[in-house]
Amino acid sequence: MNTDRNEIAAELRQASKHYGGKGGKGSVTALDRLDFAVRPGEVVALLGPNGAGKTTTVQLLLGLARPTAGAAFLFGRDPRDAAARMRVGAMLQVSKVPETLKVREHIELISSYYPRPLPAAEVSEIAGLGGLEGRPFGKLSGGQKQRVLFALALCGDPDLLFLDEPTTGLDVEARRGLWSAMRELVRRGRTVLLTTHHLEEADALASRIVVLDHGRAVADGTPAEIKARVSGRRIRCSTRIPVEELLRLPGVITARREGAQAELTASRPEAVVAELLRRDPDLSGLEVLGADLEEAFLALTHHPDGEERAA
Amino acid sequence: MNPTPALPQRNLLRIYALEAKYEFLKQLRLPAYVVPTLSFPIFFYILFGLVLSRSGSGMPNGAALYTLATYGAFGVMAATLFGFGIQVALERGQGWMLFKRATPMPTMAYFAAKTAMSLLFGLIIVAVLFILGFTAGGVRLPLGTWLALGGTLIAGALPFCAFGLAIGYFAGPNSAPAVVNLIYVPASFCSGLWVPIRFLPGWMQSAAHFLPPYHYGQLALRTVGAGTGEPVGRSLLVLAVFTALSLAAARIGFRRDEGRTYG
């Protein structure tokens, strides 16, 4: 590929996007002055709960929506410029594609849009479509459909691939199948921007994770760094200390309780445990567990004030 | 891979051709589209143009010829409105349009393909009706008249492509079929495409002058000397204004999608 290593593949600069009304009542902020860049060779996972701004980020970078403020660039150009999109492939959250057309026909049509498409056989091979080429799209299973959508994103031999929640709604087997197809692509040196709310998926595929929440990046690093950021531990115990007090303990990131059972996440569990025992001598059932990515993620996007998430 | 000095070019002609080919195949394989659009005008033509008119009409082959023009117009409109309007609404709703916009597809290729598909289905409907009219209806016309009638009928798809596009951009995917039917059925009836306009109540005949399908039908009837004497210029003007307004509305819808999008 003739990708310039210094060239930024996709970039948002101070990009905001508000939906519904110009900042008035009922207006929803999907992105809030986000700075974000994907460099060649990176496999970036945008991770966040529903409504965090993942899909909006993808849409701004593909020129499918305009930022309310700030700017989006695709290979240094306006994403609405077709020339910029010639180097890009996208797998969007499409509910249906024309069902009466065969897989082979879809690939032929989409390939025609690009100056240097991948040969159809190679597209089929990477996406694992062997034997499905002659089937109408409507006759495929859910997993097969997702693989076809993945294949359509590959047709143009893109330098940068957008995958917007590619495995949503798939069973475990289908998800693994798509993962191995994505890994094959990464092996070939493609730059990938993936959105997901599965931590496992981000961890398995990405070289860098950006955690989005309420339209802002709340963490950015390698999967290991993200985990280290909340090197934390989960502490479970039975205690009478109220949640409000637990939350105020130094080092506590999240706290919740069900009946007498409290559960905390903390960056330095030893200090927290000592403090807990000091404040509640009757504390019982103490457990300290390692946090996995799931907890790291919850801790990063936790809102103690209970404010509503953007839709 | 070697970086080539000249940017590789894609073949625009091939994009347009493939887009049109697959638009046509897509619709052709959709029984919910093909069966009603082909069978309704043919059924009505056989019923009203060939069977029920046998005893009554004043001049020989009068009904078979008259209804050839009107059911031709009726059929071309259906092929266009159902193929264009409903499909655009569906493909917007399902995210397919969004996907296409994320590719470097030339936007016009999408609309040109749908227009070509409408013209081609229009041609098929007109051809079938002509064969029926010639064989079963005994309609005999000079070659030039056949071509004028056929050409007028098929070209008449164009204003309704524009109107279908506007519906596609303003109706939701679920309501588009209802919207199309609610407009198309009464409008084609009032315009004299089902039964000759002189059999309609006076108020309907007056209202018809404001309906584009009436002017479309009159242009087709005129080629076989069966019109009501509506001036050609006025009919063309009405259809041109109708087309322009529809395109303007569709453009607003397209822009609105670009700024907002779903999801």
Image (tube, coloured by chain):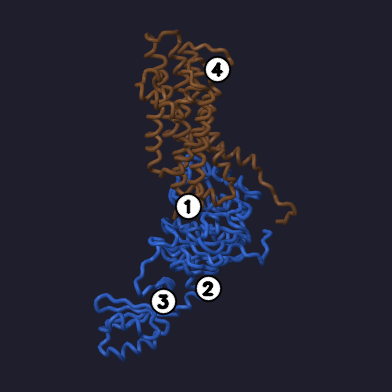
Q: Position of residue B39 (x, y in %)?
A: 42, 25
Q: Is residue A162 left or right of residue A235?
A: right
Q: Nearer the viewer, residue B255 or A310?
A: B255
Q: Which residue is mark 2?
A: A221
Residue A1 location in percent, x, y?
Answer: 67, 58
Q: Nearer the viewer, mark 4 or mark 3?
A: 4
Q: Nearer the viewer, mark 2 or mark 3?
A: 2
Hue used for the chain lettered A: blue
Which residue position holds label 4? B146
The Cα atoms of the two marked residues, 2 and 3, are separated by 17 Å
Is A90 placed above or below A234 here? above
Which kind of residue does numbered mark 3 sit on? Ala
**Inter-mark Cα distance, 4 to 2:** 72 Å
CA distance for labels 1 and 2: 28 Å
- Looking at numbered disc 4 in the image, what kind of residue is underneath it? Trp
The residue under the point 38% across, 66% down is: A309
Amino acid type at image mark 1: Gln
Q: Chain of mark 3?
A: A
Same-chain check, marks 3 and 1: yes
Q: Which mark is residue A146?
A: 1
Q: Of residues B212 and A215, which is closer to you in this image?
A: B212
Left or right of A85, for residue A27: left
Confirm whether residue A153 shows in the render: yes
The residue that label 3 is drawn on is A291
Image quadrant for the N terminus of chain B?
bottom right
Horizontally, residue B159 falls left or right of residue B194, namely right
For badge 2, the amino acid type reads: Gly
Categorize mark 2 by other alpha carbons within 10 Å: few (<14), some (14-19), many (20+). Answer: some
Upstream in sequence: badge 1 or badge 2: 1
The image shows residue A137, relative to residue A143, as above or below, that is above
Say which chain tag 4 marks.
B
Q: Are marks 4 and 2 on the same chain?
A: no
